[in-house]
Image: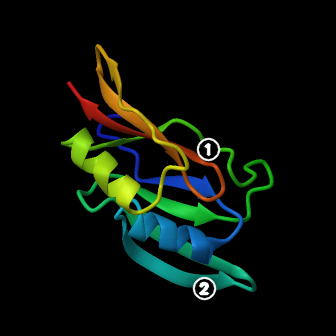
Amino acid sequence: MDGSSISIVSVPVSDQERAKQWYSEVLGFVVERDDEMGPGMRWVMLRPAGGGAAITLTTWFETMPPGSRKGTVLRVPDIEAAVARLRSQGAFAIDAEIADEPWGRYVTVDDPDCNGWVVQQDR
């Protein structure tokens, strides 16, 4: 599969409106679509402000219960600025410290359904 790239990542949530607000206000994602897909179903798609793969907030995958996505990495250019912004938005329940590893510096944050994100500055 030459030239392939990840286009959309499904994030399982229990409440699309609450999740849309969190991803746009806390992580700063841009809402690209919010369309009806059928009775009781919406296609809610957001993308990080800097571009890259989009996410869609899903409620319809039985094998992906809300909160089951873990370890998706959101790369940032400045981890200190990212953590300050996340804290100002109330993203951390406790005072999270930035971890320092040979490959980069990071913190983890959960969305309202406990889908886990790694916010990371590469070396």
Q: Where is the N terminus found, in terms of image quarters?
A: top left
Q: Are marks 2 and 1 in contact (CB under 8 Å)?
A: no
Residue drawn at (36%, 64%) of the image: 29
Front residue of this view, candidates 77 and 92: 92
Say what amino acid the circle numbered 2 marks: Glu
Question: Nearer the observer, disc 2 or disc 1?
Answer: 1
Give neighbour class at mark 2: few <14, some 14-19, many 20+ (Cα, 10 Å): few
Q: CA distance from mark 2 to mark 1?
A: 24 Å
Residue 12, given in percent of the width and then of the height, sits at 65, 56
103 to 43, vertically: above or below: above
Left or right of residue 4, residue 91 in this image: right
Q: Where is the C terminus found, in terms of image quarters?
A: top left
Residue 25, given in percent of the width and then of the height, sits at 40, 70
Quarter of image, res 2: top left
Q: Farthest residue in the right direction?
A: 62
Residue drawn at (40%, 46%) of the image: 6
Secondary element under disc 1, as helix, strand or loop, is: loop
Total labels: the figure holds: 2
Disc 2 designates what residue?
A: 36
Disc 1 designates what residue?
A: 69
Colouring style: rainbow
Residue drawn at (73%, 49%) of the image: 64
